[in-house]
Every structure is written in structure tokens, then in C-alpha cells.
Amino acid sequence: MFQPNDTITYIKAVCFGGWKMIHDSSKEEFFTLENLKELQDYLEAGSSADFSGNVKKAMRIDSQRREMVHTCRRGCIDRGLIELTAEELASIEWRKEKEKLELKLDLAFPNAQSKEVVDFEGKRYQRCFTPLRMSNSRKNVIEWLKSWKEIPSKLKTK
């Protein structure tokens, strides 16, 4: 249907035609450094002026463009075309450890309420909720992000 080297056409097809194509793992030829550069340029150009007056549509298209850049960069990393820096690797390792800890806490305390403090493996953690997705009017929360925050133990005084 679309040639992988015609990145802008491909982007527009995905933005207007749905995400089925980009998430198809058989499209590995799409994940190249040239396509990543072209996607980044297209994102920076920010041609949401095509949707003058339709703010919601422009925001949705911009969001899809950012996701396309992220997906292409992730694909280039997976194919070994981009090397991660030591800082990025450390960040990934830290995130993996944090995710494992949060999963253990979720399993140990599945009904923890907001701001509830629990003791787990000798440390104290507090349940936190943050708005993840808001309604278009920005008045209602559609989805909440659940997380855990380590809190310092109370110091013992003599």
C-alpha cells in the first residue's frame, strides 16, 4: 500500500487511517535512521495549522506524531541502529527495579487507599494517585496513575 521510504505519506496515512500499520511488527523496514530524522523534522514543523479552528483534532494529530517519533526511535534502538548512552541504560535499569518494587507492593497491598502508608521489607511506602488522562474540558479525570513513594522512616530520638 505505502512504500516505507515515503515517510511523510506513511505518517499521514497512520495519523488519518489509524495505528494498525505502525504497530505491525512486520514493518521493521520502517525503523531506519533516515525515517527517524524525517519524522522528527515533520514533528518539529508542527503542521497542525491544517486544522485551523479545530483544536482537539490538532492536539490529537500532534500526539500521534510524537508517538510515531517515539515508536520509530524505539524500533531503531531495538534493531541496534541507535546505541543507548550509559545514562539511558542506568535510567532503564532504575525504571525496571522501580517497576518490580511497585508490582510487589501492588500484590502485597492491592486495596491500599490514597496516601496510605505501609511497611514493606523494612521500608515505608505511601500510595499515590496522579491524574493520567483528563477529559477534554480538563474538569474530570478519566484515568488515574497509581504509584508508590518511599518515605523516610521516623528518626528515633534518645
Image (spheres, rainbow, N blue to C red):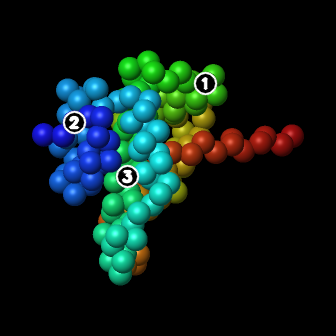
Q: In which quarter of the image is residue 109?
A: top left
- Return the residue found at the far right: 158
Three-letter residue code for mark 2? Gln
Of the image marks 2 and 1, the number of the one nearer the N terminus: 2
User: Can you say whether 63 is above or below 80 in the image?
Assistant: below
Q: How far apart are marks 3 and 2 (CA)?
A: 18 Å
Asked if disc 3 and disc 2 are in contact, CB closer than 8 Å, the reply is: no
In the foreground, 21 or 132: 21
Element type at mark 1:
loop
Can you give x and y, in whole percent of width and height, for residue 133 in the image? 38, 62
> Which mark is first along the chain, 2 or 3?
2
The quarter of the picture where residue 122 lies is: top right
Q: Name the residue under label 1.
A: 85
Residue 117 x, y percent position in the rendering: 54, 49
Residue bearing the label numbered 2 = 3
| Structural distance between the alpha carbons of marks 3 and 1 | 24 Å
Task: Name the quarter where the C terminus is drawn.
Answer: top right
| Disc assigned to residue 133 | none
Classify 10 Å Cα crowding around label 1: few (below 14), some (14-19), many (20 and above).
few
Give the amino acid type for the residue marked by disc 3 in the picture.
Answer: Arg
Determine the residue positioned at 53% across, 21% down. Answer: 83
Foreground disc of the pair 2, 1: 2
Question: Amino acid type of disc 1?
Answer: Thr
Q: Residue at x 13, y 40 (%)?
A: 1
> Dots 2 and 1: beta carbons under 8 Å?
no
Residue 34 versus residue 128 in the image, above or below: above
Residue at the (64%, 28%) spot, across then down: 87
- 45 or 110: nearer the viewer: 45
Which numbered disc covers residue 65?
Answer: 3
Q: Nearer the viewer, residue 88 or 93?
A: 88
Q: Which of the two marks, 3 or 2, is nearer to us in this view? A: 2
- For the question of whether residue 54 can be seen, the reply is yes
